[in-house]
Image (tube, rainbow, N blue to C red):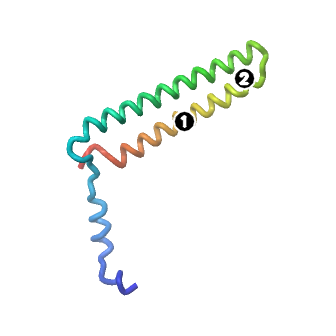
Amino acid sequence: MDLLSGVDIAMFTTAVADVCPEAPPGMDAWDDQILGWVKWGTLALITISGFVSIGAIVLGRVFAHPHGSRVGAIGLAITVLCAIMFVAIYAVVTGITGAGC
């Protein structure tokens, strides 16, 4: 406890809060391109899985196959959860990296 007695905690937290995350020089274009690919790829996978799940529900009802409809409903629920997680994770990453200081 003697080691921390001389440390001003308010000064330490202010110094930590003033850190501005920024990419190394020359990484901005590459970073934007990779993040764009990941973002659009994820959106495409969510969209495709939503359509496949809806198709499984419809075909399960048409052919009177209750397991197909159940799997489609579960798939659609998982797709909605993944879409919510995508928005939440993207908001967290954007909040951490920010738009600069």
Q: Amino acid at mark 1?
A: Cys
Is residue 92 shown above or below 41? below
SS category of the residue bearing label 2: helix
Judged left or right of residue 71, residue 96 is left
Give the quarter of the image for residue 52: top right
**Percent from the top left, x then y, of residue 30?**
28, 36
Front position in the image: 99 or 41: 41
Of callouts 1 and 2, the N-terminal one: 2
**Percent from the top left, x then y, of residue 53?**
63, 23
For label 1, the residue is: 82
Q: Amino acid at mark 2?
A: Ser
Judged left or right of residue 51, residue 34 is left
10 Å neighbourhood of mark 2: few (<14), some, or many (≥20)? many
Q: Residue furthest left?
A: 25
Is residue 90 shown above or below 48? below
SS category of the residue bearing label 1: helix
Please tell me which residue is depicted at 30% across the width and 83% down the height of the picture.
6
For label 2, the residue is: 69
Which corner quadrant holds the N terminus? Answer: bottom left
Give the quarter of the image for residue 5: bottom left
Please tell me which residue is depicted at 30% across the width and 60% down the height of the picture.
17
Please tell me which residue is depicted at 25% across the width and 39% down the height of the picture.
28
